[in-house]
Structure formats: C-alpha cells, structure tokens
C-alpha cells in the first residue's frame, strides 16, 4: 500500500532536537493521510465508509447528514441519486484500519469496526416481542427488550431515528403504563420503568397514542414519584416526559389534580437539581397555571411567586424566559398581583430584566409590569407606577420602542409610557449600566 509522506526542509530538520522523537539534524517525516481515505464531504479520515448509488464513497455520518438536509444528489458528481441505500465499503475500511495500525507511532488510533445499523425489520420484530411481554406482564422479558432498544439507540442517531420512526415510543409508553401501578414496588419493576423513561427521553416529542398511555392516573402518579426521588437522571427523565404531557391542557389539568404533584414541582424550583430540570419544571408549572385556576391558587399558597422572583435575580437565558412567563401568568389574577405587590423584589427585578435578554424576556417583563400598573387598586395610590419610574422603567420602555419589538409588547409599553409620563418629573432615574452600549440617543 502506498502512503503519503513528505520530507521537511533541512532548516526545519536541523531545528529538531532530542526529546521529540527525531535525532538532531536528521530528516523529519510528516504523515499525510491518503486522499482516498478522506471523506469528500468532511475531509476527515473515514471511520465508516459507505458507497452510494453514484459510486462515490463517503463516511456514513457525513452522507446521512447530507441526505437528511434535503439533498438528493451526490455531493461530488452532482448526479441525482437513484436510491438512498448506503453499501458498506468493507475493503476500504480494512485498508484504513491497516494503515492506522501501521502508523500508530504517529498518534493515529485504529479505526474501530463500525456496528451494523439497526434495520426497520429488527425494530419491528423487537417491538412485537415487547408487546407480547406486556400482555403477559413478563417484567424480565420486557426489561431485556427495552435494554436492547436502548442499546441500539445509544449506538448512533441513525438508529434512534429508525427506532422512533417504527413506533417505539407508543409501545414503550404502553409498557410503562402496564407496570406503573402504585402497588408495584419490586426492584425489577422499578428498574424497568426507569429504563423505559431513559429511552423515552430521546424519543420526544411523543405521539398521541403514547400520550394516552402516559396520561393515565397510574402513569402520572408514577412519573410524579420519580420526579421526587431517585437518581438525577431518573428525575430528569420524568420531568421531561411530564413537560411533554402537560402541553396538552387535558393532561395538565389531571396532573394539577394529582395529590402531591404541585408540591413536587414547587420543590424542583425551590431546590434546583440541574438547569434542565429547572427549565422543564417551569414549563410544566406554566402549563398547569394556564389550564387551571385552582392549580394557580395552590401554587400561590405555597409561595411560588416569591420563589420565582428569587430565581429571577440571577437567572439567564431560557430559564429566565420561562420564569418570567410563569410570573406573568401568576399576575394575570388578582390573587397573584396581591402577592406581587407584597414582594419588594417584584418591580425592581422586572425592570432590571428589560433590555437584558431576548425578545421573550422583554415581552414577559413588559406584560407583567403592565398588569401590575394597570390593575393596581385605587387605594394603593399608584405605588407600582411610582416604583417602576424610580427604578428606571420609563427610559427602558422608551428605548425598547425605538429599537423595535413585537406589536403586543409595543402596545403595552406605549400604554405604560402614557401612564408614567405625567409623574416622571422628579421621580425617574437611569441605571447607566443598561445603556452604556447603546449608541443612539433617546
């Protein structure tokens, strides 16, 4: 086999001293990867070479990304591919492996033999066996099947797509429902449920049939239990599935009526365990509040509004967006606004978030301030309005209008400016840190 080698210049060779693998003054050879070992798309050494219908060989991962991007032609020849079949090029792979072994002294690691991708037939056969095990309530066989499916999914994204496309999420959801009964306490059953949750977490979003299984009283109760106890991954997976279910108002109401569910979700905000769980928990809470006033009142009773305000002080990104959304929904009711008026952080935190995040951050901040100012009771004598002016809301709202925002936010910001304008003389202040990077005048 011919290898590509290049001799460095004598000047470079003289600079090579002891300790770097070459004698001083001797020639240094630089390894060059043979061109036919490189993927034409990524220009990297191929690890799983496959040949498409045009006769050109690519690395499997690269050509799959190309095809998934909606391309129907060969990247090299630009011919329309007659089929999307990918034939493993075993001869070339063996050559690459031999070459990598022979050149390991140059830091080249041996290219491992790739696993054969799972086929739709194999997935269907495995799901059929799993369905039979569910009917007979055979926990051991179910666990074996679920582990095999998880193993396939862990090998590649292609396998995950194949598994999901063949309806695995509904079958796994049926298995979860079958063994989710509260009386089930055997370690093998709990292990099975945890394995199913782990697999479902990478199959989101789930189909309607999966929702019907996971939305049963037994399944919801088990998901809530998992969100309260267990290892971090199990709690995370349970919360991710609950967020998926709560996007349907029907299941959001059922979840809100479930004993202990609201307290469990509140604890995940009060005592965060990881950003993913916090973000998803805020999403669930938002769905519950918007679907049921009784759930909103229960959240207010246990102190959610105060906890969310404390969370907002240091939060950023998507967690900040979702926390502001929850706060906006809580302040949509009189009971929620009363709680906000009693918290000295409410107005300062909301004004602080203006112009410091995304369009959604601005949207929910403006909406919440608007609710607190517009619907303030007459006996409060405009305390919220005055406080907003004192912490610099007028300038931020004015600048937001000049920079541009969506129509609903623009309307509320304009109304707030009209309400504040008569009182701003002598009351307003500017927090210069929020304007130091703005070059336009206002």
Image (cartoon, rainbow, N blue to C red):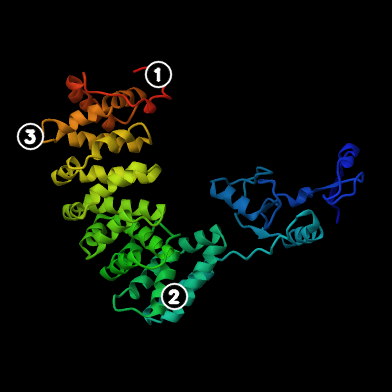
The residues bearing labels 2 and 1 have C-alpha atoms spaced at a distance of 64 Å
Looking at the image, is mark 2 or mark 3 nearer the viewer?
A: 3
Tag on residue 130? 2
Give the mark, 2 or 3, whose residue is nearer the N terminus: 2
Q: Nearer the viewer, residue 372 or 306?
A: 306
Q: Quadrant location of residue 75?
A: top right
Q: Residue at x 50, y 59 (%)?
A: 161
Can residue 411 be seen?
no
Q: Residue at x 11, y 34 (%)?
A: 380
Question: Which percent across, then down, holds residue 156?
Answer: 56, 60
Question: Which percent across, then down, holds residue 308?
Answer: 28, 47
| Residue at the disc numbered 1 | 440
For disc 2, the neighbor class at 10 Å (few under 14, some 14 to 19, many from 20) is many
| Residue at the disc numbered 3 | 379
Looking at the image, is mark 2 or mark 1 nearer the viewer?
A: 1
The residues bearing labels 3 and 1 have C-alpha atoms spaced at a distance of 40 Å
Side of 277 where 17 appears, left or right = right
Side of 302 where 59 appears, left or right = right
Q: Quadrant location of residue 111?
A: bottom right
Q: Residue at x 39, y 77 (%)?
A: 189
Question: Which percent across, then down, holds residue 378?
Answer: 8, 33
Q: Nearer the viewer, residue 153 or 390?
A: 390
Q: How many marks?
A: 3
For disc 3, the neighbor class at 10 Å (few under 14, some 14 to 19, many from 20) is few
Give the mark, 3 or 1, whose residue is nearer the N terminus: 3
> Image quadrant for the N terminus?
bottom right
Q: Nearer the viewer, residue 120 or 105?
A: 105
Q: Report helix, strand or loop for mark 2.
A: helix
Looking at the image, is mark 3 or mark 1 nearer the viewer?
A: 3
Which residue ends up furthest to the left in the rendered image? 379
Question: Which percent across, then down, holds residue 4?
Answer: 84, 48
């Amino acid at each position: 086999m011919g290898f590509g080698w290049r001799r460095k210049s004598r000047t470079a060779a003289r600079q090579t001293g002891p300790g770097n693998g070459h004698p001083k003054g001797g020639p240094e050879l630089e390894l060059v990867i043979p061109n036919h070992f490189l993927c034409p798309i990524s220009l990297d050494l191929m690890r799983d070479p496959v040949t498409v219908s045009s006769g050109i060989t690519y690395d499997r991962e690269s050509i799959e990304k190309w095809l998934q991007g909606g391309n129907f032609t060969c990247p090299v020849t630009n011919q329309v591919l007659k089929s999307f079949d990918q034939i493993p090029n075993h001869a070339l792979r063996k050559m690459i492996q031999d070459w990598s072994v022979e050149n390991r002294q140059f830091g080249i690691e041996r290219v491992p033999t790739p696993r054969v991708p799972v086929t739709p037939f194999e997935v269907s056969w495995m799901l059929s066996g799993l369905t039979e095990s569910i009917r007979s309530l055979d926990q051991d066989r179910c666990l074996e099947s679920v582990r095999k499916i998880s193993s396939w999914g862990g090998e590649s994204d292609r396998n995950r797509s194949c598994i999901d496309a063949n309806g695995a999420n509904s079958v796994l959801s049926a298995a979860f429902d079958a063994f989710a009964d509260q009386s089930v306490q055997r370690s093998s059953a709990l292990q099975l449920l945890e394995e199913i949750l782990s697999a479902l977490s990478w199959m989101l979003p789930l189909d309607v049939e999966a929702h019907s299984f996971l939305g049963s009283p037994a399944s919801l109760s088990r998901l809530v239990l998992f969100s309260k106890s267990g290892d971090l991954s199990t709690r995370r997976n349970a919360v991710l599935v609950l967020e998926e279910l709560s996007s349907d108002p029907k299941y959001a109401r059922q979840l809100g009526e479930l004993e202990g569910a609201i307290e469990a979700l509140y604890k995940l905000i009060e005592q965060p365990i990881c950003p993913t769980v916090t973000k998803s928990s805020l999403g669930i809470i938002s769905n519950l509040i918007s679907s049921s006033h009784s759930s909103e009142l229960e959240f207010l009773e246990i102190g959610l509004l105060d906890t969310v305000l404390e969370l907002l002080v240091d939060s950023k990104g998507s967690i900040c967006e979702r926390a502001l959304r929850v706060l906006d929904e809580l302040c949509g009711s009189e009971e929620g606004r009363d709680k906000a008026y009693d918290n000295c952080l409410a107005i300062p935190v909301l004004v602080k978030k203006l112009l410091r995040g995304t369009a959604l951050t601005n949207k929910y901040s403006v909406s919440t301030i608007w609710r607190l100012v517009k619907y303030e009771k007459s006996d409060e004598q405009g305390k919220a309005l005055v406080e907003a002016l004192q912490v610099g809301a007028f300038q931020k709202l004015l600048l937001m209008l000049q920079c541009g925002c969506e129509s609903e936010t623009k309307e509320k910001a304009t109304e707030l400016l009209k309400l504040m304008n008569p009182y701003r003389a002598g009351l307003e202040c500017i927090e210069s840190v929020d304007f130091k990077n703005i070059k336009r005048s206002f």
